[in-house]
Amino acid sequence: MAVEADGVPTVAVHTHVFARLARNAARVNGTPTLRQAFVPQPVVGQSAAQLRAYIEGVDPVNQRPFIQEVIDGLTAPLTEADLTGVSFERNTPRLLEPGTEADLARRFEEERWTDYLPIVLPTEERVAAMLEGTSRKPDEVVGRMRPTNYREFWEYTVEKVAVNAVMAGARPAYFPVILAMAASGMTARQSSTTSWAAPAIVNGPIRNEIGMHCGIGALGPYSHANVAIGRAHALLSQNLQGGSVIGDTYMGSIGNVHNYACTWAENEERSPWEPLHVQHGFRPEESTVTVFLGGWYVISGYGPRATWEERFRHCLAACEPYSPPILLLDPSSAQAFVERGFTKKQQVIDWCAANAVVTAREYWDDPWIQTLIKPHAVAGVEPWAGMLKAAPDAPVRKYRAQDISVVVLGGETQAAWKMVGGNFARARIMRIDDWR
């Protein structure tokens, strides 16, 4: 920590449910004896009296008075173990010892290198074939990734990404898409207790070149390319960021089925509007993949019908305040919006932003908003500073327009739509063509 580097003694304070994660994070960052104290969970939403009781009570992890734990941590001299620390080899062997297919498959499962579905064993020949899908050198660094902001980054090469692409059953033609997703640094196995996933949208000519599916069943398992690319991203996220181990590097309380595979293609040819990548400054002939942090919720509906405005307002109100929606519209649903005067996609986005409204009390009561947004409001950052001053029953907007996305996909068998959590402000658009 910066204050420690300046010679200021520091004790890290966590809630007790994160004891294992906090201690492991300290260990993998080379400071296994980092002085830490713990209070009970929860903290958000507790009264001042309840919080004071935490401070005046017993540390539930160290089983000593909390205040004494803090005082000792700040005043006790550093020991030899404190000064020595620890370092780790942040790498794995390039090759395993030969074995039977069954033995190797079992080894991969026991080492937690798989998603517990059968994999394609990444032999040297198969990895070499995958590398034919790019002009980049095998030892070139693609990017860095970590399961949470509080752990160290792991660095990975083109060859390591290829290994995971092979395991997922991908084909060399898909490899530039997978490399672009890996280069984003966006993990599909985020460790947050909120159980995030990483929805990804592919745009441009590569969709058709490699057989991605964006028609009937666009979100389902009806295209080898869609599923294999999404699975490859999930596997490389697990294996190249230092793991995704329950209670250690993964803390998602409920979990998320989208962690298996969550890559979709936009049906640009049937959309009445510009596609996602063109909306954000790319040319139609460029191929891109947009990787979101999201996938927390899915809300479905039909229309727009006669009461669409009321239905949309209800659904937007139900969307998580910290995770604005990606609005996925079937082409027939998008066309129906056009017929109602929404000739530009931005009009739909602006309508959603203006109508995603809750009371100030409800907005600020959300734990993620209290933890991650309220500090910005207190610091005077708009629009949140103004919202913090609103009366409890006053209506406030949950989302900024720039945080909401609209994507057209589906096969026009029904005017359906879905809202899937995915904040564009935290997404990354990557040029796939850079990785050919």
Image: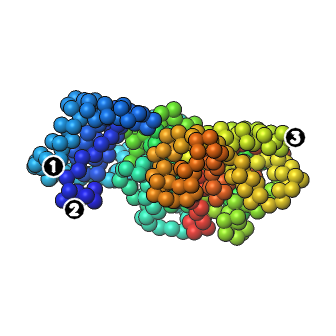
Q: What element carries label 1?
A: helix
Q: Which of marks 1 and 2 is nearer the N terminus?
A: 2
In three-dimensional space, the C-alpha distance between marks 2 and 3, rounded to whole angstroms, equals: 64 Å
Amino acid type of disc 1? Asp
For image coordinates 41% across by 51% down, the residue present is: 149
- Circle 2 packing at 10 Å, graded few (<14), some (14-19), many (20+), is few
Amino acid type of disc 3? Ala
With respect to residue 269, does 397 lie above or below? above
For image coordinates 17% across by 47% down, the residue present is: 74
Q: What element carries label 3?
A: loop
Instruction: Please give left or right for residue 54 compared with residue 307 in the image.
Output: left
Counting from the top left corner in percent of width and height, residue 64 is at: 20, 31
Q: Name the residue under label 3.
A: 306
Q: Mark 1 points at which residue?
A: 82
Which image quarter holds the C terminus?
bottom right
Camera-nearest label, 3 or 1? 3
Nearer to us in this view, 106 or 275? 275
- Would residue 96 be visible to someone looking at this image? yes
Amino acid type of disc 2? Asp
Nearer to us in this view, 45 or 93? 45
Q: Earlier in the sequence, mark 2 or mark 3?
A: 2
Instruction: Please give left or right for residue 336 compared with residue 267 in the image.
Output: right
